[in-house]
Amino acid sequence: MAKKRERLEVIRDILKTIRQNRQIKPTRLLYASNLSPQMFKDYINELITKGFIRLDIDKKEKKSFSLTKKGNEFLEEYRIIEDFVENFGL
Amino acid sequence: MDLYALLIQNKEIFKILYALVIVLICTIIVFKSDKLFRLSSHKGIQYFRNAFLFYGIGFAIRYFFDFLLFQSALPGYFYFVDELFEYFFIMGGFFLLYSLLWKKIEYPGLEYTSSLLNSRIVVFHLMALLIVVLDFLWGGYLFMFISQIIVFFIASIISFSNYQKKNKKYKFSKFYLLAMVLGFFAWVLNAIAEEYFSWNQGIVINVYILNLIFFLLFLYGVFRIRKLAK
């Protein structure tokens, strides 16, 4: 059985997916994230609140997510954060 | 003149330098880990940062205390500052241990408005206050030593378990284990120096050296991890 992903790994996966697509629709991101709808909603709300992603709404009222500068910075620093947490056993 | 004699002869100056170096190390660790916490909101990093924040404040208080005493400050000043230093030091140890244990204690999704004072951490504050009061009444540091020996003993066991699980991939885990074991021995030596040797200067210098290595190991870890990850 696959190991349950840690919170940080889930965030990294969501941000990576958004970065790869530049802009992605909520439904596609939900499928790609492999999370339940409720958990997906919680993570997305957290990421928007923290300013890692933003919700864009176009003229046709279609929603999509894109990465912010802070989200990009998180992905750059992710390895350092992961190494820090694992090496110090936090 | 050997090194120990030189250190003992100029102990007041070296004590101030020692405290300043540790305050500087703690400040660097707090800023580096705070940056990672702000990006990740990882509670373990937050508690780790708090540990060094409290150690840093504790040593800063001690630095000013030593400096003022060295400059012949009022004798009445001593008790208040000494108990304050003890409180911050005990809390530093508790936060360090909690940074290793929080995943087993807090359920997923639990959010606090403050990592310095919440329903879990308040228990540590109360314990630290109790220890400080007991030491004040008994006159000495025995209760602080016992509490920190227990803290570092548990932290050493957890670090050993982490080292066994992660050493192949995460090389700093062995230094972390080493730091915890050094911390444990430093507290044991501290207790022995107070209880049986009336603060023998030779033993106290060894405690200072162990403490310095303890903090330097963490500083090394913080820089090494950033370098390796790039």
Image: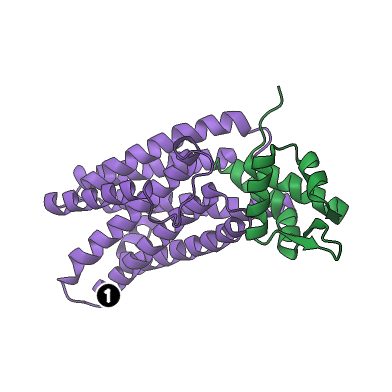
Residue at the limit of the structure toward the front, as seen here: A60
Residue at the limit of the structure toward the left, as seen here: B137
Residue B95 x/y as whole percent: 42, 49
Q: In which quarter of the image is the N terminus of chain B?
A: bottom left
Q: Mark 1: give few (<14), some (14-19) or many (20+) Cα within 10 Å.
A: some
Which secondary structure lies at badge 1? Answer: helix
Chain whose colour in the figure is purple: B
Name the residue beneath numbered marker 1. B68
Residue B128 x/y as whole percent: 28, 50
**Of residues A60 and B86, which is closer to you in this image?**
A60
Q: Quadrant of residue A51?
A: bottom right
| Residue A46 visible within the image | yes
Residue at 50% of width from left, 55% of height from top?
Answer: B49
Q: Quadrant of the C terminus of chain B?
A: bottom right
Colour chosen for chain A? green
Residue at 41% of width from left, 56% of height from top?
Answer: B116
